[in-house]
Image (cartoon, helix red, strand yellow):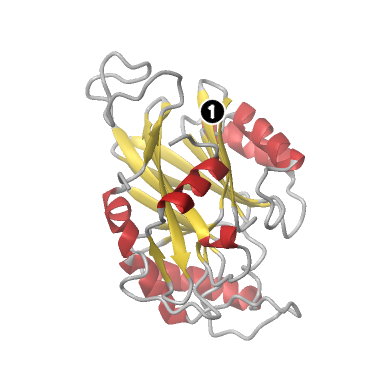
Amino acid sequence: MDGGLYRRPWPGPFLAFFCCGFLAGCQAGSPSITLAFLGDVMLGRDMKPSESTFTYLATQLSNADLALANLESPLTDAPSQTRSDYVLCAPLENAAWLAEWGLDVLTLANNHILDCGQDGRDETITVLMEQGLIPVGPGMVPVHLEIRGLHLSILALDDVSAPLDVGQAVTVVQSERQAGMIVIVSIHWGMEYQGGASGRQEEIASQLTDAGADLIWGHHPHVLQRIDMHQGMDGDSLVIYSLGNALFDQHGLPSTRQGALVSVVLNENGISRYKVIPFVIDVEGSRIVQPDTGQEEQILDQLGEDR
């Protein structure tokens, strides 16, 4: 494997993974940052996290200015508060692994954040912050970050636990964009185990990019869905419909054990380029490993990416 597949949000051959003066939107000396996105991370049930869990992605995670994942398991000692057979709560001490692996931002807007009740959610937020990690969501209040002069607004939405108020989300995105922010929307949406985006996903994506979202990063289906470029407010917006599982103990469909890290370069104009790094989950070893050629082809095909 060559370390990943690079893509640009404009047609034509990719020449190099750096900003050239003749490329649209790139100016000499303009700041840029790299963000690494992962899908669902679950640290409960049969997962046994260790130092080696994300070794395969260590370079991408450490080189990113910000590494983000959706935390599907509350980190808490609180008892279960759901009758569901799928309770994903995990021990508090597992928060240390998230920091050890090089993650920075964990979104909590998903259908499992209340598996151990409000106390479990609050304890999760507390322990993440104690590890120097940044929790985002649930709710319509974005987190603001500044990295090398670029102002990021990260919003975490959930369209699974209850239907998303799309109008309210559009208003928030518009306000953030008008304030000069680069707007990143994490959204828990879609149907489990469906390899294609639903009409509702596509409609929400269209409305949010029209409102000014630079990047939409989806999860919940537990399988990969395509990556699209949308014409946004001032240029191209990147829509990752689903990054599937990043770490999960699902043994059923092979596609639930196929994932990808997407590394995105941003500058003052928004999305510059992105890179896809396929991987597979070794459930028994609770770790991420390199895919074989066939698996890599399947992952790239599911994302709509050519080799």
| Front-lying residue, 142 or 207 | 207
Q: State whether residue 30 is above or below residue 250.
A: above
Residue shown at the point (53%, 30%) measured from the top left: 237
> Residue 13 location, x and y as percent?
37, 21
Residue 260: in sight, yes or no? no
Q: Which residue is mark 1?
A: 178
Q: Is residue 28 left or right of residue 240?
A: left
Residue shown at the point (63%, 27%) measured from the top left: 210
**Can you say which quadrant of the picture contains the C terminus?**
top left
Residue shown at the point (63%, 54%) measured from the top left: 139
Q: Secondary structure at mark 1?
A: helix
Q: Amino acid at mark 1?
A: Gln
Q: State whether residue 221 is above or below residue 241.
A: below
> Residue 219 location, x and y as percent?
59, 53
Residue shown at the point (48%, 77%) measured from the top left: 47
| Front-lying residue, 12 or 205 | 12
